[in-house]
Amino acid sequence: MATERVRKNFWGWGWEERFPDEATRRSIGQLAAAFIGGADLRMQEPPALDEVELAPPRVAPPAALADRFSARPYDRACHCYGRNYRDVWRGFHRDFRAAPDWVVTPRDEADIAAVLDWAADARVAVIPYGGGTSVVGGIEAAVGDGYAAAVSLDVGRLDRVLEVDAASRAARIQAGASGPVLERQLAERGMTLRFFPQSFELSTLGGWIATRAGGHFATQHTHIDDLVESVRMITPRGTWHSRRLPASGAGPNPDRLALGSEGTLGVITEAWVRVRPRPRWRSKATVTFERFADAAAAARAITQAELFPANCRVLDGREAALNRIPTGGRALLLLAFESADHPVDDAMARALELGRSAGGRCEDGPVSAAGGDRVDASAGAAWRRAFVDMPYLINVLVSVGLIGDTFETACTWDRFDALCDGVIKELRDALHRVCGGGVVTCRITHVYPDGAAPYFTFVAPGRAGAEADQWWDLRAAAAEAVLRHGGTITHHHAVGRLHRPWYDRERPEPFGLALRAAKRAVDPAGVLNPGVLVDPQAE
Amino acid sequence: MATERVRKNFWGWGWEERFPDEATRRSIGQLAAAFIGGADLRMQEPPALDEVELAPPRVAPPAALADRFSARPYDRACHCYGRNYRDVWRGFHRDFRAAPDWVVTPRDEADIAAVLDWAADARVAVIPYGGGTSVVGGIEAAVGDGYAAAVSLDVGRLDRVLEVDAASRAARIQAGASGPVLERQLAERGMTLRFFPQSFELSTLGGWIATRAGGHFATQHTHIDDLVESVRMITPRGTWHSRRLPASGAGPNPDRLALGSEGTLGVITEAWVRVRPRPRWRSKATVTFERFADAAAAARAITQAELFPANCRVLDGREAALNRIPTGGRALLLLAFESADHPVDDAMARALELGRSAGGRCEDGPVSAAGGDRVDASAGAAWRRAFVDMPYLINVLVSVGLIGDTFETACTWDRFDALCDGVIKELRDALHRVCGGGVVTCRITHVYPDGAAPYFTFVAPGRAGAEADQWWDLRAAAAEAVLRHGGTITHHHAVGRLHRPWYDRERPEPFGLALRAAKRAVDPAGVLNPGVLVDPQAE
């Protein structure tokens, strides 16, 4: 399996071997500096494992489970943080003070239940861990002083596709299976989940469910929520196991409380999810627009026409440039339709008609293919490669002293233009104030009949040693702008510890009371991922 | 408004004026008796209002709200029960012992908050009431001895479409608006919700949300859940008001806890819902099959092909006959595609191809229309008329001493044939044992890629005075069969008090703990619809 061939980078995004040599880092840094109109690079060396200083574990593991517990420096460092800019910055700068005391890797559900029992008795915080790609502080052991210790509970050994029900097009998959691992097993049965978040290489089904991740489809089934048929989750009060059902009206949907629970209610161990055959018909095209707002209007018209493209992403001119797609500053609409059953050319033709009505110019395509052929409209393919590689850029930016990050939201169409303009303006002001400059780009990742999810990227020069603080100032300014303009604090990156202040303001107050009470009911000792979503101790 | 022109039947389904005269009742009864192979009719007269005996209210209303409270016999009788067979049977037989002490009709949210405050202090149970069409005992004042009194809180005065956001295709609608009332107001703005449950004439947006009702669309957006953008709900601990968002990943979705809460967490006052223009292109067809299982397989193939017909309903031969559609015993598949944007003929052609592959014979259509013309494939139209009129049949069956009812479930495709066969067989056995005979029919109301929702109807001879007990024995046998064969206790009729025993077995145990804790957090006095979903007092 992938995790055995290559090793995760213990301080940064992705696989260790993907961190480039100094010359490559310098040239990437120079490109980034040029993109933001110039910045000095400070070439710095990444940490070696023997530079990692860790306090000894504060508690002993339970004797019966000792062989599942590891305090090896690599394991503890790897499980110390998620992978947002500040996480990578802290790891790069050898700060692993927040590392969990132990990393526990259960072999089965009984192990998980035993760990939870032990943790409740010993007052040890338990941080469920899937792929480790949280960008919101969702998996770090920052649990306060109320706990004797903290363990990171890594479900990575639970990585099998256990069952495929071909009639229902559903599969029972363990929570620790990463994107490539589960897709490989599904492919053997002629199926695919087709859920491709940017973290696909590393992130896991359990993590997707716990964080309500957003995937491949730009319309319709945008979140993992829509693909979940039932969930199995180990809580301190027993197994939360919903019945496999295509739909039900029996009370509030139990799965919808597990979805987005971010490890605060239990440890997800497996789920039945909806799978499908690989698409056999495809059509792709790119359309450019003078203005981003016009491209957004085209995406709106297409989704309100219920044409359901698999891809319907909009990049502003700067975002296209960042993805090395030359558009001369024009906004870009990437369209793709796919089907396992029938040709999709008519749908594409109608979508392009709507695109042209909104002022678009078809630059590439439609290119269609039938019978399983692979097709790649060139700009679309370039964008997709850049999509999966983009998070690796954070490692390099940190290593050359630049700041960079992304965040996303969603809002209804009536507020969309004002939100995008407002967030960009307020973030630019913050960049100027905090960093003396920098660039903001915008794309749309998911589109709905009633709104869309804009996704922002920023890059800026950092001040030596202050980059993490500067980053926080920028993110806080952005979050304020998002909330003020009617957006949600997150469309698919979850809440974690990073978004808590804004999440608390966004959610209905009585829902907050209900959620905290629900958590207490299933986790009376408050050991599961404390500080995420709710404060178990607070009244 | 409709509710002003005609009056609700205080003991039975629907409008008072729709209860037929004796000759018509006799001829309907004779048809039903013939359908079940013969049964004696006992012609009985419905109750007059002055036959209704009610105990005086046990508490005085709060002085400041006295003019919102009514203890008029008509109001109390009307709000005594929902409208399942046993409800109608009890009303017909002049049993209104369970009537609420008062019916309160708030003018605004402040009234509702004041009623909840008063109720918590006075220990009065509050039963939220929308259209009064619950078929699961969801709105009756059967609250046990722990309360000083019970009031039915009727949100009927809150019936306005407050706002339409044309850009986002969304509307803010008050909870008390019934189907026709909200559709009329939306039509003035060129929009429609297109949510047509069988109770459409009377049921309300708030009731649909509280019960996760199922509507018009047989595929995709089957439940009101999918149309809700945000919910506003008054709880004893303040206003539960979610942000208007097309989607979010910020923690568990608050709306999904309000959806299906059945009045136990708060009183829903309004919601933003997704609306759309009226369809301009339509195509309809009917296909018949030798076997019901083949028709189901066709529906499965069509939905797994992601063709998304608006209608994709399957009737077995007896169900078709009950709906007066002669098929010679063959199973019937009703197909309809619709779009406000583009022709749907290709989708219909592909669906019919899949239908023929499954052994189907196209009997009628495809008939298509463009530009807003109305089209009606004849069998489809007959079925739709019967659909809305069907619940009125209960009134007549009760009046002639017959038993009849419906129930629904959903399961994954791998279990579908066995579930349908098993439920029909076990219910037939129960009919034979309890009633000495009777008929069961089956249709599919909603179809998913991973499963479907079968809907069962039964008619049987009753024993004078014992009909309600016989009905309960039949429903209990059916519920056992549904659960044993892997179904849910309800696909779109909610839980109420009727389904509680099976709901408690279906839901994950820790979720039950979480839900009860959530209820206590927002309704500490436990006054909201006690006994539905959870027992507030239990530990």
Image: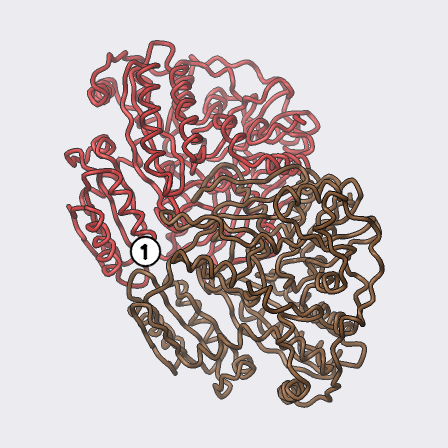
Chain colours: A brown, B red
Q: Residue at x 78, y 54 (%)?
A: A143
Q: In this rendering, is residue B525 above or below A285?
A: above
Q: Residue at x 42, y 12 (%)?
A: B51
- Badge 1 marks a residue whose secondary structure is loop
Q: Outermost residue, top direction? A: B464
For this view, does B220 lie left or right of residue A131? left
Q: Residue at x 35, y 19 (%)?
A: B430
> What residue is shown with label 1?
B305
Q: Amino acid at mark 1?
A: Ala
Q: Picture coordinates of residue A114 (x, y %)?
A: 69, 41
Q: Quadrant of residue A51?
A: bottom right
Viewer-proximal residue among B383 and A413: B383
Viewer-proximal residue among A235 and B60: A235
Count of labels shown? 1
Q: Picture coordinates of residue B233 (x, y %)?
A: 59, 43
Q: Quadrant of the N terminus of chain A?
A: bottom right
For this view, does A243 lie left or right of residue A531? left
Viewer-proximal residue among B469 and B157: B469
Q: In this rendering, is residue B6 above or below A294?
A: above
**Which chain is disc 1 placed on?**
B
